[in-house]
Amino acid sequence: MTEHTSSVPATAEDGADLLNAVEAHHSRFTVLPSEAAYVAVVLWAAHTHLLDSFETTPRLALLSQKPGSGKTRTLAVIGDLVPRPMDATGVSPSVLARTIHDKKTRPTVLLDESDTVFGPKAVGSEDLRGLINAGHRRGGHVLRCVGGGTTQTVQAFPTHFALAAAGLGDLPDTVMSRSVVIRMRRRTCDERIEPYRERIHQAQGHALRERLATWADTVRGDVSRAVPDLPNGIFDRAADVWEPLLAVADAAGGHWPERARTACTRLAKANDS
């Protein structure tokens, strides 16, 4: 593996320290199933501030077989860290397509209770699944009719957007293959966390969000040109999923490049099994 260095100016915030702070913030309120899961969630939140630097954006899937596994709480903590979070629960594909097409106002989409959309009893989810899949790659788009009556025209809406979803069971196979999958579990009695209080703790998350945005501006050029080394066995769709997160880790430096590649190998392998 080549040595990973960052060209961040000396006066800029230390990226590794910043990601450490984001991870510490997460661990106060969430119990994730592994160290690899914390690494992936932190890198995913950071990558949303650099979205247009990458050819692809991985979907983050927080999934469990049973309720009460911390999915919604993890999604809430993530929402405090990403740019313009939007709760997409119950949003129609047409509304979502019109919301995400403008880069200046494009939200980070958070979809809780994804099983109500994609579960075995759900119907009519094909349009949303297609939108999510198209938005995985920069340059993707969907066609929508605009206007009314005889003046309707067909318009292409850009669909490149970041998505984190939480739910019971699995997502559709085409979405799963584009996702970093975290298999959530119920925490044990010995695993203590702080109660999350939005009125108190949201501002702390927002402060980290501002720091992530500022840091992202200092590394955007390097990240846009980066071609990160991939662990053995990571190729094709898995490479599309993990390259943005590895690029963020390399830009941050410190122990993050090594931790990112360990997390990549473990989570990608688990997703294939």
Image (cartoon, grey):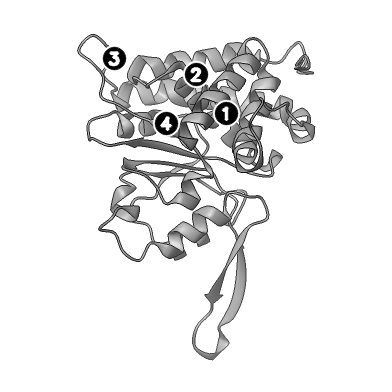
Identify the residue at horizontal 51%, vertical 58% (top origin).
131
Residue 198, x across and y down, in percent: 31, 27
188 displayed left or right of 247: left
Image quarter where the C terminus lies is: top left
Asked if labels 2 and 4 touch by Cβ distance under 8 angstroms, the answer is no
Q: Mark 1 touching mark 4, by CB under 8 A?
A: no
Please tell me which residue lies in front, 200 or 55: 55
N-terminal of the pair, mark 3 or mark 1, is 1
Verify CB contact (< 8 Å) between mark 2 and mark 1: yes
**In 3D space, how far apart are the residues under numbered discs 3 and 1 (Cα atoms)?**
23 Å
Q: Position of residue 137 (x, y in %)?
A: 63, 50
Cα separation between marks 4 and 2: 18 Å
- What residue is drawn where x is 45% and y is 50%? 173
Q: Residue at x 60, y 38 (%)?
A: 238
Q: Residue furthest left?
A: 189
Mark 1 Cα-neighbour bin, 10 Å: few <14, some 14–19, many ≥20: many
Tell which of 141 and 262 is nearer to you: 262
Between disc 4 and disc 2, whose residue precedes?
Answer: 2
SS type, badge 3: loop
Q: Residues within 10 Å of mark 4 (few under 14, many from 20)?
A: many
Mark-to-mark CA distance, 1 and 4: 17 Å
Q: Quadrant of the N terminus?
A: top right
Which residue corresponds to mark 1?
Answer: 46
Asked if residue 110 can be seen in this view, the reply is yes
Q: Earlier in the sequence, mark 2 or mark 1?
A: 2
Q: Which residue is mark 2?
A: 22
**Viewer-nearest of labels 4 and 2?**
4
Q: Earlier in the sequence, mark 1 or mark 4?
A: 1
User: What is the number of the mark on residue 182?
Assistant: 4
